[in-house]
Image: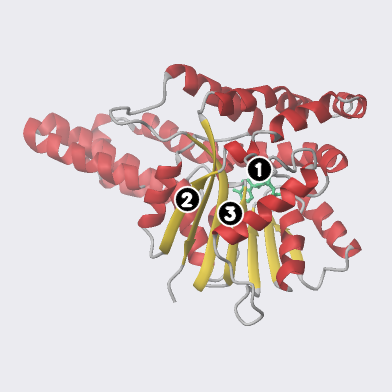
Amino acid sequence: MHTWVQLRTILVSLSSICGTKTSKFMSLFNFMGICVIFSMKNQGRNLANICQIWRKQTLLQLRLAPLVAVLFSAVHFGSSRLYEGIANFYDESSGLWEDMWGEHMHHGYYDTDSGSSNQNDHRLAQITMIENSLSFAQVPDSKEERPTHVVDVGCGIGGSARYLARRYEAKVSAITLSPVQAARGNVITASQELSNLVTLQVANALKQPFEDGSFDLVWSMESGEHMPDKQQFVGELARVAAPGGRIIIVTWCHRDLELGETCLKPKEQALLDKICDAYYLPAWCSPSDYMELLKTLELKDIKYADWSKNVTPFWPAVMASALSFRGLIKLATSGWTTIRGALAMRLMVQGYQMGLIKFAIITAQKPL
Ligand SMILES: C[S@@+](CC[C@H](N)C(=O)[O-])C[C@H]1O[C@@H](n2cnc3c(N)ncnc32)[C@H](O)[C@@H]1O
């Protein structure tokens, strides 16, 4: 929506310079904007209302309705297809991941600088990732100040949710798009006797089923890359954060653009496109883009770190486990979506090696 407003401003100026032809184009552009906003806000249910507005536009004379209808559908059905793809991908692949790697579906943090590294203990590295994220965001530990209500946005099978519940004795609400993950996560939670604290449910991070200001810790571990509208994503994280609450986003980004660059190099974009296909990701953004988005909200202490170097051992380890005898057997009995995901692992390694993919932590606090 922000981009649309900017584009619209440029077109208004153009319109005043070039006269009536551009005005008609403005009219079309205005209308397309209305369609996009409607599709985002009402999930496309109000097509009839949109047509009413359409009739009132001078555009009707231009008989461009079919074109706009196609554009409208593309925006709306594009994200529904993405959500469906994400849900299916995790429905299908989570069992295999859990068998091979356990309950945490995220990178490990490896102490690559110190000689005595944790490079061979991947499960420990995943816990280190959680702990380092909490310290980076300066989440308080004391009994009086520690979080009591946490939301895990894009929770997988609830590894972080249960960890945070135990760590802080906090109530954790966790959401995922995958019904299989939610069901499995609740079974594990019950087996660990944590059902009184942790609940997983199917819900969309861009339209969270929670009241404003509900949580003093808002946690998103490697789910941001799946969000088709980053502004809405961070807006929702800020909305559900309580005054004084911390927001932690750990996510895949592309590198920041250099001065004079307006986009990535074609070779880089081509690599990201292949990764997007395999892992059901929409367009990527850079850490600076996230910082800019967060700055548009009422948040303080917005900061970022690049942990790309610290996650280097992760993908080679995942590839090695997939190529083990057990991994190959399990892969062979899984579906095509999972196999395609496994084949794309080398692209992730390549992306990190090129300096194209950045593993970023971005944190902020909602003022009291
Ligand atoms: C790589 S997994 C990370 C899981 C978990 N955070 C962890 O660290 O174990 C990505 C998760 O994001 C969830 N996700 C992606 N898009 C989402 C959306 N729009 N709303 C809710 N969850 C979403 C997926 O369903 C999946 O559970």
Q: Residues within 10 Å of mark 3 (few under 14, many from 20)?
A: many
Q: CA distance from mark 2 to mark 3?
A: 21 Å
Q: Secondary structure at mark 2?
A: strand
Q: Amino acid at mark 3?
A: Ala
Residue 319: image x %, image y %?
76, 27
Residue 114 - label: 1
Is residue 292 left or right of 225 when viewed as pictured?
left
Above or below, 224 against 171 in this view is: above
The answer to whether residue 176 of the structure is visible from this angle is: no
Residue tagged 2: 304
Upstream in sequence: badge 1 or badge 3: 1
Say above or below: 274 vs 34.
Answer: above
Q: Kindly report which numbered mark, 1 or 2, lies closer to the viewer in this rendering.
A: 1
**Could you tell me which secondary element the residue under label 3 belongs to?**
helix
Could you say whether the residue bearing mark 1 is in a helix, strand or loop?
Answer: loop
Residue nearest the viewer, comparing 154 with 84: 154
Q: State the mark number for residue 212.
A: none
Q: CA distance from mark 1 to mark 3?
A: 37 Å
Find residue 17 and report its horizontal and vertical position in percent. 7, 34
- Give the mark nearest the N terminus, 2 or 3: 3
Is label 2 or label 3 in front? 2
Residue 172 falls in image quadrant: bottom right
Extreme-top residue of the structure: 267
Q: In this figure, which residue is indicated by the disc labeled 3?
A: 205
Q: Is mark 3 within 8 Å of ligand 1?
A: yes
**Quarter in which the C terminus is drawn:** bottom left
Give the residue at x 14% y 29%. Answer: 21
Residue 182 position in % (x across, y down):
77, 54
82 and 113: which one is in front? 113
Q: Around disc 1, counting alpha carbons within 10 Å, would you say few (fewer than 14), some (14 to 19), or many (20 or more)?
A: few
Q: Quadrant of residue 22?
A: top left
The reply to whether the C-beta atoms of the residues labelled 2 and 3 are less than 8 Å apart is no
